[in-house]
Image (spheres, helix red, strand yellow):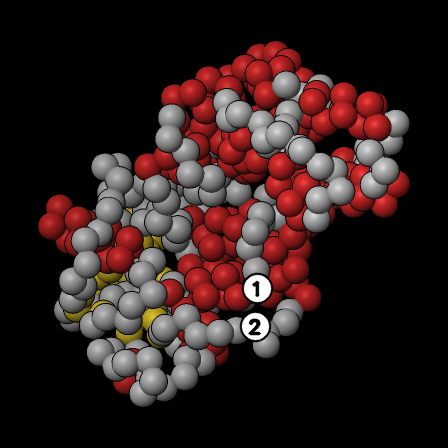
Amino acid sequence: MSSTLFQGSKRQITLQSIPQVLFQFSEEIQIPNVPFSFPAIPSAKYYYVSRHGHQIPMINSVGSDQEKEESQRIWYAMNSDEVFPLITSYAISRRDQIGVKSSDRPASQISLSMKKYLKQYPDSVDWFFEDRFQFILGQMKRRSISDFLSDFYRFPLNPEADAFKAARLIEQYVRDGDETPLRIYLKDGYVWHLADHPFGYYPIYELFFLLTRFASPPLSKTQLRLAERRNQTKFNSPERIFIDAIFHYEIYNINEILQIIEQIALEGPEMAGKRFETNNAKWINWADEYLQNFGKQPRDVEYIGERIFKLTDDLSTWTDLQIEEFAEKLKLELPMRHEYPTRYAWIGRFAATIRRFRTDV
């Protein structure tokens, strides 16, 4: 194909195309009704060449409408564990795993998904340990190393990407908010189509996905709206912290969530927290847990000598104000919130304190 100037990159990108896209997938695919190129869905057919000769999928703004629609369908189908017939500019299914029952299926090899474009079945990767991924895992609620690496199998990394360097750069970015090292990382690989792409759309994991696949993950309709709103916030602002905390939470009323975000922006998190009956301004860090219990009837605690897990489950349905009153009644101090990664863990520590000191009640 002829050389094309990608808007904003100020670089001539020579687009190429694979001979034929192959895509055979039988299940129904749920695709949000959004523009073809938002945020950065990859084209299944068109690509350009990186610094080291690897194929970099072009953003899905080129080709016919039919090709763009097919690219969307393929990208959302990639989220399936199934290995189906697939040939695109960014991924190829591992042939010896297609249509093979699990007992006869060759074991997946993570290196093939990191450097050979291969989509494979997400086999167990509990054995894999890498220090440089621990920070990203620490920013993700209820994510294990197995969940994290399973996405490597579903969405193969681009061979031009350096997953370990990307993880380190993201850790630095989270601390200082400086995008420059991330931009240099992309520039060094000649990943021009993301030269001016806003990083403000993406929470930590989604940003890692972008820097290793050079495309946005397949976001749901509510996630896309949250991503748009996130891009309007400042680095480390209360609104952005709130959005990141609920980004993977199943949201049924996005308009109400957007109203809460506006209240946080206008009045601050402490005032916005009143609806959840908390005086803790840091509640936004555990916003998904507050949403989960919002409006529900608190469970009765009939016997505080219950097993710790049962007591924790019951107390987690209470509001912060109710827990504070309960602690005062028992003459016990609550644990320090900042020492615990989740609200549930904080309550679990309080439940353990109750069992230790007040089994007489």
Up-down relation of residue 148 to residue 37 (above or below) = below
Q: Residues within 10 Å of mark 1 (few under 14, many from 20)?
A: some
Q: Which mark is residue 126?
A: 2
Q: Nearer the viewer, residue 290 or 78?
A: 290
Q: Amino acid at mark 1?
A: Ile
Disc 2, disc 1: CB below 8 Å? Answer: yes
What is the x, y in percent for residue 53?
39, 72
> Visible in this render: residue 240?
no
Look at 62% across and 41% down and name the residue there. Answer: 313
What is the x, y in percent for residue 142?
56, 51
Work out which quarter of the rendered image holds the N terminus and state it: bottom left
Up-down relation of residue 41 to residue 165 (above or below) = above
Check disc 2 and report its element: helix, strand or loop.
loop
Taking 284 as reference, is 40 left or right? left
Corner quadrant of residue 132: bottom right
Q: Disc 2 to disc 1, how far (Cα)?
A: 7 Å
Q: Which residue is mark 1?
A: 145
Look at 19% across and 53% down and name the residue there. Answer: 28
